[in-house]
Image (cartoon, rainbow, N blue to C red):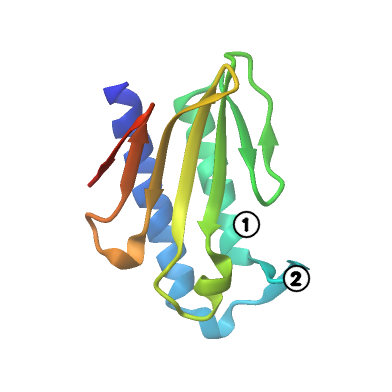
Amino acid sequence: MHDIEAIVEKIARKAGGLALEYFESLDRLPVERKGHLDLVTEADRAVEEFLLANLKAAFPEDGIYGEEGGEIPGTSGRIWVIDPIDGTFNFVRGGENWAISIGLYENRRPTFGVIFAPRSGPDAGWWKIGADAAER
């Protein structure tokens, strides 16, 4: 599991860097509505594309499901579930409470996940493995 943790942490941090680039230019970022209080931006789509490509490269047999519509079938029985900018509503208003969320399901059960909040600093993130959770 430690290899998976290291790989996903690296991917999440890079995705957070990409999201921060968009965050720093919010005044030029178009916002669309998906539903009541449910927004999507170019940043959401770009970060999701980044996550899809990098998770697929790292775990080619795994499936991936993204909140913004990205979906890649897999053959391993494992599925990564991603929310590229969890808290888009806060993101577009310049708030601090948003994150990159990545979870792994194996045999229909959650087994690993990471939430990386780039605006909270370089060491921000909460990791969960199985039934145990630890703050980093």
Residue at x 44%, y 58% (from the top left corner)? 99
Q: Secondary structure at mark 1?
A: helix
Q: Secondary structure at mark 2?
A: loop
Residue 90 picture location, percent across and down: 51, 73
Residue at x 54%, y 38% (from the top left corner)? 53
Residue 115 position (above or below residue 94): above
Going by the numbered disc 2, the residue's amino acid type is His
Q: Which mark is residue 5?
A: none
Q: Which mark is residue 45?
A: 1
Residue 54 picture location, percent across and down: 48, 37
Q: In screen coordinates, is 2 left or right of 58?
A: left
Mark 1 nearby-residue class (10 Å; few <14, some 14–19, many ≥20): some
Residue 69 position (above or below residue 78): below
Mark 2 nearby-residue class (10 Å; few <14, some 14–19, many ≥20): few
Residue 64 picture location, percent across and down: 60, 32
Quadrant housing residue 39: bottom right
Residue 29 picture location, percent across and down: 59, 77
Q: Which residue is mark 2?
A: 36
